């Protein structure tokens, strides 16, 4: 199977494998005119190392995801990881609603960093890039926080929120890449895929 494209754009001879179960990353690939031929999320240990800082952690996890994926001749594997950082503190995916509430209380009224690292892997090479964006969350009332938690949108999202969902109403300011905050920086991802031989649609 070859990498399919949206519309009438010429198909690539490469087979694109998305190493992520994130529906947001799947949708963002569509913005580039790409539909993965397979979706195979790798199963790795995402526990931070003692003393590990957020950017190094995010890059390490992304490399580990790529390393866990097989890439045969003609395959191009795409993996990514998104980490929310409050100073040196790593806020990953909350285990439950209590942890999500704790994360939102920490982020309320403060600026934080959202780091997304992307890895593109072929049979003989791996490229990795990371993008750091800054985000400000408004000061949340208990009612706003609890109403958001009740939506369940926090589940599976670093820092306990997703900017593309209801929590977008809590974000008055960003500096950086909006799609990277969502989970996949488009400009950097397009560059890496093109380096790997995938024809990415550009207007």
Image (tube, rainbow, N blue to C red):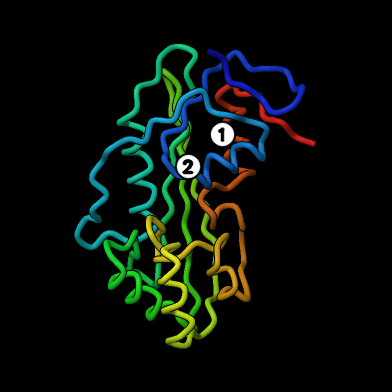
Give the crowd class for mark 2: few <14, some 14-19, many >=20 residues within 10 Å: many
**Disc number placed over residue 128 in the picture, else none:** none
Q: Residue at x 41, y 34 (%)?
A: 19
Q: Residue at x 59, y 73 (%)?
A: 169
Q: In screen coordinates, is 179 left or right of 51? A: right
Q: Nearer the viewer, residue 86 or 149?
A: 149
- Of all residues shown, which one is farthest toward the left? 50
Q: Give the percent coordinates (x, y) of residue 24.
A: 53, 47
Q: In screen coordinates, is 137 left or right of 4? A: left
Q: Give the percent coordinates (x, y) of residue 95.
A: 27, 61
**24 in relation to 119, above or below:** below
Label 2 secondary element: strand
| Residue corresponding to mark 2 | 118
Q: Give the percent coordinates (x, y) of residue 66.
A: 37, 33
**62 in relation to 175, above or below:** above
Q: Give the percent coordinates (x, y) of residue 114.
A: 48, 62
Mark sitting earlier along the chain (1/2): 2
Report, in whole angstroms, how far the alpha carbon at label 1 lies from the one at label 2.
9 Å
**Disc number placed over residue 192 in the picture, else none:** 1
Q: In screen coordinates, is 119 left or right of 61? A: right
Q: Nearer the viewer, residue 69 or 96?
A: 96
Labels 1 & 2 near each other (Cβ < 8 A): yes
């Amino acid at each position: 199977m070859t990498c399919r494209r949206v519309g009438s754009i010429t198909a690539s001879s490469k087979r694109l494998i998305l190493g992520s179960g994130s529906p947001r990353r799947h949708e963002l690939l569509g913005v580039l005119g790409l539909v993965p031929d397979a979706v195979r999320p790798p199963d790795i240990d995402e526990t931070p190392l003692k003393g590990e800082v957020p950017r190094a952690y995010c890059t390490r996890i992304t490399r580990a995801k790529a390393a866990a994926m097989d890439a045969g001749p003609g395959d191009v594997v795409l993996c990514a990881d998104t980490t929310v950082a409050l100073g040196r503190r790593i806020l990953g995916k909350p285990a439950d609603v209590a942890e999500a509430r704790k994360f939102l209380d920490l982020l309320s009224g403060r600026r934080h960093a959202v780091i997304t690292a992307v890895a593109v892997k072929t049979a003989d090479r791996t490229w990795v890039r990371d993008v750091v964006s800054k985000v400000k969350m408004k000061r949340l009332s208990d009612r706003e926080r609890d109403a958001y938690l009740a939506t369940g949108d926090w589940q599976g999202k670093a820092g306990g929120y997703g900017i593309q969902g209801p929590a977008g109403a809590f974000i008055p300011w960003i500096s950086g890449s909006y799609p990277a905050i969502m989970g996949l920086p488009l400009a950097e991802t397009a560059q890496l895929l093109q380096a790997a031989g995938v024809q990415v649609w550009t207007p």
